[in-house]
Amino acid sequence: MIRRLLPLALLAPLALGFTAEKPTAAADANLSKIKLPAGFTISYFAQGVKSARELAVGPDGTVYVGTKDDKVYALPDRNKDGRADEVVTVATGLNAPNGVAVRNGALYVAEINRVVRYDNIAKTLRQKPKPVVVYSQLPNKDWHGYKYIAFGPDGKLYIPVGAPCNTCEPEEPIYGTINRMNPDGTAFETIAKGVRNTVGFDWSPVDKALWFTDNGRDQLGDNLPADELNRAAGPGQHFGFPYFFAGDVPDPEFSQGKSAATYTKPARKLGPHVAALGMKFYTGKQFPAQYRNQIFIPEHGSWNRSTKIGYRISLVKLDATGKQATSYETFAEGWLQGKTSWGRPVCLLQLPDGSLLLSDDQNDAVYRISYKG
């Protein structure tokens, strides 16, 4: 992207950001490759957001973006036209700050090894705000180290710790878990085990149960194991890693002497190696009624499969109870063209108007998906 030259009088307030440009012809050509159900459209909310990962929105509508790089960005849309006015760099020099969440006017950021907080973020985002360390006792290993964070219905901050390997017996109990803590970092506790690598979760609008995606192990061939969509009915469940994957695929090395019946089976098997990430329950009113309370899943895409798969948004439909998955289908696709991808979906965020934002860490972009009927 070419940054627009600004008058000197405007350089100071925008010192940490640049004005959002209109999409180029090439960018629009890429978007035209995306196939969506009738009535849906996709557009750029922001471009030039390097390594865009998790998304969060503040009370004033500003969208915050974590990255697998070292920066966190803010995307204000003051005129509410469905496109960010500028890309503001909030913080730099962080350790893969993938996770972002907003609570009581503060921006929480999850690095690989710690969680920090930027208070009063709406007023300080241009001032290189100083972080407050919330929790600093997370492992400092890169493998499956990206953190996805969110505040649950109980007001606690949820954070996973992925396994530091393809498959292994975790060397410390903290690996392969989902955890939660108070907003101030106290009362840290593990609520789910046997989770290889989740980088996306959300709570059911029906019964507040925690649902999460989990990536299956590699090197068992093209079609094994499936990625997982899991439902945690309550604390204390074990979801199988490293002994079983997708509920019934034994690990060749670690499953001996174990029974698959011991572990919680997935609510739905997803595609093998699709790299399912930042899932989201749709609770808005903009989309047609049949999408309400259903699960959208960005699939980042396979890296070690002979024929690539994923690079799309999938839709898992649930029954009226909100507990049983009834179908799994493609909602949006086109980021993979033949054997080549030009984008990799990561995380979804529902905006107050009911549209969905989607981050892409290959195309360095955030898209907006809306329904116009």
Image: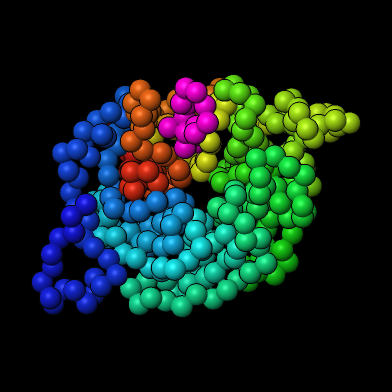
Residue pictured at 68% horizontal, 29% vertical: 246
Q: Position of residue 40 (x, y in %)?
A: 32, 31
Note whether residue 285 is visible: no
Q: Position of residue 174 (x, y in %)?
A: 73, 55
Q: From which residue to which does the magenta span run? A: 296-311
**Drawn side of residue 34 relative to residue 327, left or right:** left
**Drawn side of residue 88 relative to residue 206, left or right:** left
Above or below, 62 relative to 218:
below
The majority secondary structure of the magenta stretch comes to loop
- Classify the position of the C terminus by image quarter: top left
Q: Position of residue 32 (x, y in %)?
A: 24, 30
Q: Position of residue 75 (x, y in %)?
A: 33, 59
- Reply yes or no: does residue 171 show up in magenta: no
Residue pictured at 52% horizontal, 31% vertical: 304
Residue pictured at 49% horizontal, 59% vertical: 96
Note whether residue 341 is visible: yes
Residue pictured at 54% horizontal, 76% vertical: 132
**Drawn side of residue 356 relative to residue 323, left or right:** left
